[in-house]
Amino acid sequence: MNAMNRPDAAPPPLLETRDLLIKFGGVTAADHVSMQIEAGKNLAIIGPNGAGKTTFLNICTGWLKPHKGKVFLEGEDITPLPPRKIVRRGVARAFQIPQLFTEHTALENLLISAAAREGLRNPLQNLHNISQRDEMMHLLDLVHCTDVADRVVVELSEGQRKLIDIAVALALKPRLLLMDEPTSGVASSQKHEVMEILVGALAEAGVTSVFVEHDMGIVERHADEVAVWNAGNVQLRGTPREILEHPDVIRDVIGEEVA
Amino acid sequence: MDLTIFLLALFDGISYAALVFIVALGLTLIFGVMRILNVAHGSLYAIGAYATVSLTGFVLSLGLAPVLSFPLMLISAVLVGVLLGGPIEWLLLRRIYDKPEVLQLLVTFAVFMILEDVQRLVWGTQPYFQASALQALGNVTLFGVTYTVYQLILLSVVAMGLLFGLRFFLRHTVIGKLILATTEDREAAQSIGIDADRVFLFTFIVGAVLAGLGGALASPTTSILPGMGADMIVLSFAVVATAGLGQIEGAAVAALLIGLGRSFAIYVWPEVAVLVPYLIMVLVLLVRPQGLFGTSVARKI
Amino acid sequence: MKKLLLTTAICVAMPLAAMAADKPEALKIGMTTFLTGPASVFGVPARDAMDIFVKNLNAEGGINGVPVEVTYIDEGAGAEALTSEYRRVAETEGAEVMLASISSGNCQTLAPLAEDLKVPNLMWDCGTQRIFEEGSYDYVFRPQGNATSEMLAAVAYLLKTHPDFKTIAVVNQDYAWGRDSWDIFRTALEVMKPDVKVVGEFFPKFGAPDFSTEISRLQALRPDVVLSTSWGGDLDTFVQQAFQRGLMNNSTFVLPLAESSLERLGSSLPAGHVVGARGDHYFLHPERRDDADFQSFMKQYKEATGDIPVYSVFHASQAFAALKTAYEKAIADNGVDWPDEDQLLAALKGLEFQGLGRSLHMREDNQGVESQLMGTSAQAGEYPFATLENIMIFDGEGLLPPVGETSIDWIKGLDASFVDGLTVKTYEN
Amino acid sequence: MSDISQHSPSRGLVKSGSLPSMRALLTLLAVLLLAAVPFIAPSMQLLINLALAKGLAVLGVTILLRAGQVSFGHALFFGISAYAGAFLTASLPGADIVLVLIAGVLGAALSGLLVGLFVVRYRGIFFGMLNLAFSMIFWSILEKFYHITGGADGIRLTRPSVLGMALERDSFEAVIFYLSVVLMVGLGWFTLRWFASPVGQIFQTIKTNETRLEYLGLSPKRALLSGYLLSAMLCGVGGSLMAMTQGVVTPEYVWWVRSAEMVFIAVLGGAGSVRGAFIGALIYEIVRVYASAFAGDIWQMLLGGFLLVIILFAPGGIMGIADSLIGKGGKSRPTTTKEDAQ
């Protein structure tokens, strides 16, 4: 354990990457990324398309293996682990394109998540009768989807599916939640409300979050910290105010958003 | 194993591989373009053989030269492709392109069952044998062992010709390019005005002609009898899966692997010869799940 | 007619002599045969022949006035369909006698079933010698020889005609028949001609479309004799490919089932190779070809099918003859209009009957004793295919182990003198 | 690949309200009718017995269809179980019927685990074809090692005793018949419950989203393996019953056409439907026997035509037709109307 080797140091960060490198063909999607994510904060990642934001999430969750570099979760090297083992260690993920069980209902998606979390094995117990049902209904309520609880998700709107996707991840009771554009499918009039609820829920459950976001308004209001991604690495990092007023950011990132 | 036996096994393996390749070629072409694993391919193979035997028998009974059996093979193959392959695609497969792969596979399985009985109704149950094409080319002796020119040379040449011919056709002709474009992205191809239905029909007919040609070429070397299609289909499945579905050059390599594996097994340990195709398939897929030459598609999230 | 008069006389004389069954509307029999699958090369001709036998018999008034009806069951439809259909015909349709089957595997399934269902069953074509050697049956009879007599005849003919061969290779189909027949053949060869060396054993899979590699090896091995007990398309393919590649010039082929392929092989079976017929079955049977019944059947069969009959037709004729003779005997012996089951079984015990070949009889273990015909192929030019010369017909009695002994054990106790002890008649052609 | 399964995995999760449903009633009636067969139609008993045995194997295939996977080699487990029973009775004459069944299912489970560990890495056509390859390897072994396996003629499975009693054929067949009915009801019920349980639901998500499954901290391979094992064991039960009913096992038990036939029946009955597996097997077996009896040599053609008609015009299979007849419409939301749970 790294922590043991450094008895005098502060406890290791929740998630740390060291020198991550990955290339797709000729494109360097992660260019020696070293980054630390502290517990208890909501970190927003911004940057132009193709800057490597999603790739970063993919590496941190084990979906992609870096060609070089390592990922540590509280000091433990999780680089070689498959996503499921990283999830088991408390890192959940919501996706840009919702990853749901399309033939199941919204509620069932959550129940399956709860069953996965609890490791339910009884072959004779009905999924709908598991004791986590109320908890899951509450989660659905939290993302304003109670009324579609019994609808098959393939019939739902993109926005609803994004929210359920996040709820499925929350149902795992993670310590760290990685989200890829959580509000991208949500109507712009509701974005802030949704983020409000989400951030509240995260704080209540003590979940650290990292979210990729394009909407600077959301970033400004809901992030504790912002990292600006460009050409496969972190270009800048700071509080929302510092970042959003930075001239490079205004030129490279926000300018693009406006365009 | 001394060199002579090694070479003998090599010759046997190649001539066997050539025939298997010709049949597998049609199967893998159809799969590559249409994403359909055509179980009825085996029946088309058998019917190609039956048709050749009948036509050749008829021509010979008129007192014409046995050399005519060569063009008759081609005619039988085309007949199979057009008269059977065409309607199968047009009447059946076209209705199920939006259905799951497995249902498509079951449709071809149903066609297979029907064609098996059609063969029996048309040609009866007695085996046919028509070796005039084989006899017309004579023999060649290597290391004191006599081979037929037909099996050792003609089949290999035809197989090579088809391999390179099909490659050229797909890459350097307009129709070939249309087929490749449709294979890569059907919707995009349609949006630029390619008639995907016609491309599929054409591809299926070509695939069926290849199945028929395989049967036609096999006919002088073997007894034509009910059930011959079922065996061939399993074998060519093994070739196609080993190669990677839709891989034309790969099918040639896989056919050679399986052909050589089988013939060496007969020299070294005859008891396992029949296991060889499946063992090779399992071993290859164990190491490379997508087949020797297949490409794996990573899922985007 | 004489028999019928006799029967009537007995009936009048002893009206209360026996418990008689009611005369049925028709005598229903069920026959399993391959209508589909590779073995339909035997099954379909046998069915065609059966139709002729039944038609002829019914035209003569049937058995004691009772017409015969046959229900055919396809052995090619798979084991479940076969057993359920067999039971349906035996139990629901009320077939009095069943004829089953061609496949040895099916015989092994159906023989115990017939015993349980208590329906008389004639095993009309399957070859396995195991049935009566491994079990005893009251309801199952075999109106034909078995693999042991067939293989021993082949060994005997080979030793008589080619006494000096030194090496042998075998190419048999990879299933029970191919393996069992080679076991018998090899065991016999080991005791009767111990100096022979087995140089190659090949068991290509059943229905193999190509024997090129085996033939290449055989050409390299150059055995004096090549044995193949294959049949149907497998045999045709093997012989054609061997012929084409000149293997048949170097080695003598012994083909105990080739009688059934003669017509199809045409000129591809050259002169000088040993041909067998699973019994004394040959469309030019030297002892029978001038008989009126033989000739009229050959004519009828040719008209109906366009082919010459193969051995399965002869086997069907024997089963049908056994059935007919047993009913007539039971009627006569008991003085009844129609026999009940016990009377029929009693008649079948030790029955003597004659089909298209020589006359046969049933042993006490219900195994038929059938003569075996072997010959050498000749391209005489009379037919567009090979016919036989130097024909030997072996008496069946000497070719079977004594009742209660198993074939392999019995053969192991034999020696070179066995061949000379056999009763055999030889014909030029 | 492919959502071949016409059934939404979540169907049957929610129990329908207090109304005793038509479907449950019909099922009960059908089971009672089956149980009465030996009395009302004794000539059908064997046929139906074989159909039930096959139906259990088809149920195994059906399970995989629920995960969107199709195996063209499940006859492997059918055959392994049958041969295990045959070898057991050969070495232990008069072994008990329970022992034969357990040996068979154990054999199927073990081989299912071994093959499963390998094939769960694959999906779609490759999954199907690899299963085929394994079954063909086993088939070749059965044919090759005929001194042990009896080759193509197979080996006899002598009649086992029943709880220590040696029975005549008639009573034994009655025992096997009712054992099959009980196993059909019991295992059918279990499968329905399993489908609705968390494990079964997780298994069925293979069909729609393995990425999410992985991100729930679960292994898709392990999830598939759990269902694969269950399916292999069900095939094993079917194979064991078939072998004891037939009294003989042959390599034909493993032949690829039999595997294809199982998929055929599953689709015929209604891909993914538990009841459909048995109804499909009954109809298939009856059609096949009567077609081969009365249509001589064109029974394959009839069956092929039948399959085409089902796929093209009634993709929901017989159960789909039945549903629309009962008037519940195939398209309505399954959870509220259709219940698989009895």
Image (cartoon, grey):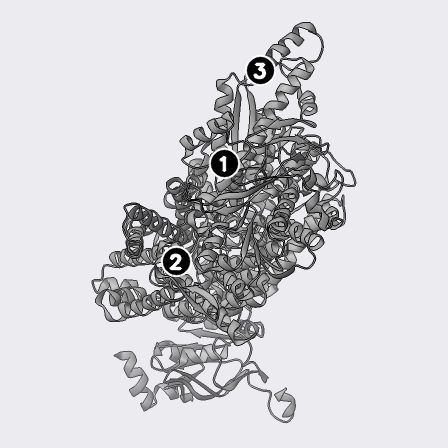
For residue B80, say whether it is visible: yes
Callout in the foreground (1, 3): 1
C359 lies left or right of A66: right
- Quarter of the image where the C terminus of chain B is located: bottom left
Q: Residues within 10 Å of mark 2 (few under 14, many from 20)?
A: some
On residue C283, the disc is 1
Give yes or no for contact between labels 1 and 3 (Cβ–Cβ under 8 Å): no
Quick one: which residue is furthest to the front in this view?
Answer: C428
Q: Determine whether the residue tagged by mark 3 lies in a helix, strand or loop.
A: loop
Quick one: which residue is furthest to the right in this view?
Answer: D164
**Amino acid type, residue under disc 2 in the picture:** Leu
Which residue carries the number 2 mark? A156
Alpha carbon of mark 1 to alpha carbon of mark 3: how far?
Answer: 30 Å
**Amino acid type, residue under disc 3 in the picture:** Asn
Question: Residue D221, image x and y in percent?
Answer: 55, 65
Callout in the foreground (3, 2): 3
Alpha carbon of mark 3 to alpha carbon of mark 2: how far?
Answer: 81 Å
Question: Residue D61, image x and y in percent?
Answer: 53, 51
From the viewer's perspective, is residue B13 above or below residue C423? Answer: below
From the viewer's perspective, is residue B248 above or below residue A218? Answer: above
Quarter-of-image position of residue C143: top right
Chain letter of disc 1?
Answer: C
Question: Residue D240, image x and y in percent?
Answer: 65, 47
Which residue carries the number 3 mark? C64
C39 lies left or right of C188: left
Give yes or no for contact between labels 3 and 2 (Cβ–Cβ under 8 Å): no
- Quarter of the image where the N terminus of chain B is located: bottom right
